[in-house]
Image: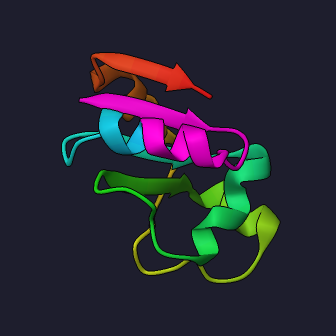
Amino acid sequence: MQLLTLTEVPTVTEQQFFQQLLTTEDVLLLTGRALPMIYRAKPWLCRAVVRQVEIDKLGGQPHADWTAIDDARWVELSALCAKTMVW
């Protein structure tokens, strides 16, 4: 299981790369400038999560594809994943 944290909305080329890289076992977490992506369907087959504190700051209701997690779950995911990538 891999954890990919996106800090920016990916370019078309990056999206194609992530499409090939991520599997249903992997987790996508959004933060920073990538957060507006929560308002539409997740872009890849992996699990899609966002920290509840980020949702609270941004406001609005995420698309149903996105799961809100607390900070404890975020730390747990970071520890459990074989690879963690920040992009």
Farthest residue, direction top: 82
* Colouring: rainbow
Examine the structure image and report whether residue 40 is included in the region drawn in magenta. no
| Vertical placement of residue 10 versus 1, above or below | below
- Quadrant (top left/top right/bottom left/bottom right) for the N terminus: top left
Q: Nearer the viewer, residue 5 or 53?
A: 5
Can residue 73 be seen in this snapshot? no
Residue 42, by quadrant, is bottom left
Residue 28 located left or right of residue 56: left
Q: Position of residue 57 (x, y in %)?
A: 80, 63
Residue lying at 42% horizontally and 80% vertically, measured from the top left: 64
Residue lying at 72% horizontally and 65% vertically, measured from the top left: 36
| Total marks placed | 0
- The magenta region covers 1-17
Q: Nearer the viewer, residue 66 or 10?
A: 10
Q: Nearer the viewer, residue 83 or 57?
A: 83
Residue 20, by quadrant, is top left
Residue 43 located left or right of residue 9: left
- Quadrant (top left/top right/bottom left/bottom right) for the C terminus: top right
Q: Position of residue 81 (x, y in %)?
A: 30, 24
Q: Position of residue 6 (x, y in %)?
A: 61, 39
Q: Position of residue 80 (x, y in %)?
A: 28, 24
Can residue 48 be seen in this snapshot? yes
| Vertical placement of residue 21 versus 64, above or below | above
Residue 65 located left or right of residue 54: left
Residue lying at 37% horizontally and 45% vertically, measured from the top left: 19
